[in-house]
Amino acid sequence: MFSKEIYISRRQKLSFLMSSCAPEGARGIALFLGNVDAPAQYKNNAYKFRQDSSWLYYFGLDEPRFAAIMDLDSGAETIFADDFDIDDIIWTGPMPSVASLAALSGVEQTAPYAALAAAVEAAKSAGRRVHFLPQARYYNERLIERMGLCEPSLDLIRAVVQMRLVKGPEEIELLDAVCDLGIRMHEIGRDAIAPGVVEQDIVGQMEGYSLAKGWGVSFATILTQHGEIFHNHSHAGKIQEGKLLVIDAGVESNEHYASDFTRTYPTGGRFTQKQRDIYSIVYECNEAAFSMIRPGMAYREVHLMTARKMLESLKALGLVKGDVDEMVAAGVAGLFMPHGLGHNMGLDVHDMEELGENYVGYDDDQKRSPQLGLGSLRMARRLRPGNVITDEPGIYFIPALIEKWKSEGTNAQFVNFSKLESYYDFGGIRLEDDVLVTPDGARRLGSRRLPIAPDDVEAAMAK
Amino acid sequence: MFSKEIYISRRQKLSFLMSSCAPEGARGIALFLGNVDAPAQYKNNAYKFRQDSSWLYYFGLDEPRFAAIMDLDSGAETIFADDFDIDDIIWTGPMPSVASLAALSGVEQTAPYAALAAAVEAAKSAGRRVHFLPQARYYNERLIERMGLCEPSLDLIRAVVQMRLVKGPEEIELLDAVCDLGIRMHEIGRDAIAPGVVEQDIVGQMEGYSLAKGWGVSFATILTQHGEIFHNHSHAGKIQEGKLLVIDAGVESNEHYASDFTRTYPTGGRFTQKQRDIYSIVYECNEAAFSMIRPGMAYREVHLMTARKMLESLKALGLVKGDVDEMVAAGVAGLFMPHGLGHNMGLDVHDMEELGENYVGYDDDQKRSPQLGLGSLRMARRLRPGNVITDEPGIYFIPALIEKWKSEGTNAQFVNFSKLESYYDFGGIRLEDDVLVTPDGARRLGSRRLPIAPDDVEAAMAK
């Protein structure tokens, strides 16, 4: 937890941002719900507790069953939670009081958790606005429903997004540290690659490290010899010689900041020429995107310029043909990279995804595209110092998607479908770094970089 | 997953048990809900999927967002789930259809997930009973509420408990296997104990193994130098010389069967005489309890006879005084062991806890005691072959509890409070094995036993 001054100043800024939405006396209250434990097998056998990220940002307290109300008119702040009773303390040992925990957030007033509903009801009855955020957890969704609250507050969403998008120095320090953990976790995975090894064995070694040094993984580890299948979470297969293994994995620190790196390895330690050709394109796209990242540049433009570079190289290989600018405009890159170039990262690995991608990654300046690939871009905004984004180009050969375009004649003038057939068993490649936008440009997070150039990858695997 | 014949025969037996509750035509339907993904950070960043255990028992399908209705009058069975569409398949790769998955359970009829509510409504409108189980997950609780269903079905709870309490040979094989994983995980933990090591480092190594070889841990690992604090999940401390480290941890297999072992280690590798004295009592209680386990014996009696043995030994040490039988009757053992001797184990580590402990561990033959310790006993029933239970006596010195008894004069004639003061920094000891009730008696699960005798523990730590 940071010092209480950090939380006080964040809440003051939030109050200030919200004050522009309505005149004094008509601002209402802002309701924040921390998480409760999420049952795995049964209610008392829960998953490892994960606090709500916006709660962590404004209040920091990493305990279940906390809530808070900020009165945006009077400035009063109240934390709602229950003290342990003597019977609990026999089982839990001495526990700090809610009042002493609230003081760590700089909140002076506390009340029992059960008083929350009445406090919300009182505000509603007085005709006051009740601002709240979209809820990630079903328990909190139901709590909101039971309070008779309907729509999350766009004003509150916009204010929270504006603040959380720009990371403060206290956050950047933690992001650097967790990226170092993520890099080390990736090395453990890379060093375990060998033909015959079961994928789950590698995943377990990696995730064990994340639990030893942090909260755990920041998302379900992707470790697959079918990189072209994006949502493949089965790890039952054995490593086979001659394949490409995509590892997309991150650590979440004990302070709940995320890292998110992707590397793609030749399972036998050396790329074939065909693999190296495609890998080199993705590598150059990753480097090119990074070199474009600077304040004022829209990340949508970085995505499009990266797509342009990718198509130029694919054209040189003979996989696409025609005018590159026309191909970019037609969205041909989406056939090979049907996802966006990157996303915001912070307390969530896709930062604030629950608040709505169109509020987080888009604004009045940048609108969502309907195109495959570009349409999946989670972060399109003009970059600002303090933004933390991922740079993760990829090239995939997805037989079902290629066949769909072929049969529907999509971009038939640009795509060399017959040549693509020899890539149906290629798989996919993605290369991802975590990047901080600085006043001058950008720097990659972490104190070192995971080997990424093809020769460096082979050298690292030969050790 | 087992062969479909297993699931068909389990559902036939369930139908048969339910048929005794009402005449044909008045039996109604039984509703089973599988789990959906549980969000961690945001909806699309979920915890590792964990299927509902009763769903696994009767249907086996380990995929999210499945449900089923058994018509207890007509015998019809329907699985409700959604097929992947072509857009999904681009991201997920080729996926089996719901019909082909349902066939693996031996269910022929399928319908979309959204048709579930209408099917329940049709049964309700026709005045039929809708049997369902208590739900562990908030999503499913809300689903049940939205269907206008009120009370879980006692008939269904009793039938499911009757079946799941007795493990079949196909389950025992998996329980033996996961106990071997659990034993190996404990060895990894034991071998990592050394003064100066951060507890979280040991936990990570252990849990990494559980993820490499199984689904993960079957419950949040307890690894603490404060064994007297039962619900201590902080692992920030460093191992200190001269302490006792309680490790209570289990693996859940990829097939979702649980193991659950506890050992207590001297952090420096050798017990002090004071530690060895208490450890030896707990060890002898573990052995004595095991020797009493056999069909027909109530586990409540095993608990009480173990408490008796514990009090005899504590009396020899001078910590309690007076007539042992009177002490047992007065519940003096609860001061030292305020929990029960053990619980059922299977697909859940506390098997079927969500169905209600009083239905799972108690019956008309055995009623719950209000006493500290005995009152926390989760399994009191008369044992039957195929029951799987834990044998986990412990002795703890809980200053807050001792002080409470002392100040309230509880059992003051039996407890030597002044002598107990020198144990306030002792901590606690628990020793737990997983036991199968056999036709002749009992055997410990797993192909070998974790070292437990004090000399064997010291020898294992010296390696």
Image (tube, coloured by chain):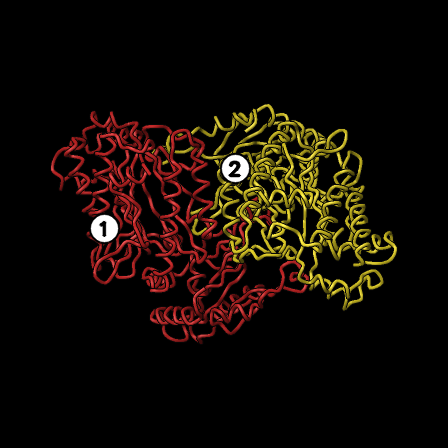
Chain colours: A red, B yellow
Instruction: Report if residue B138 is visible in the image.
Output: no
What residue sits right under mark 1 in the picture? A290
Give the vertical position of A307 relative to B295 (above or below).
below
Q: Quadrant of the C terminus of chain B?
A: top right
| Residue farthest to the left, as pictured | A323
Report if residue A324 is visible in the image. Answer: yes
Residue A279: % across, % down:
24, 37
Instruction: Assign a secondary structure to mark 2.
Output: loop
Asked if the residues shown at circle 2 and circle 1 are in contact, with their CB atoms under 8 angstroms apart, the answer is no
Residue A339 occupies quadrant: top left
Name which residue lies at 51% across and 53% down: B197
Q: How many marks?
A: 2
Disc 2: which residue = B214
Give residue A186's position: percent from left, percent from top: 37, 44
Query: x, y percentage for residue A211?
Result: 47, 49
Type of the residue with mark 1: Phe
Secondary structure category for the residue under label 1: helix
In the image, B294 versus A30, the foreground residue is: B294
A208 sits left or right of B2 in the view? left
Badge 2 amino acid:
Gly
Relative placement, left or right, of B77 versus A452 is right
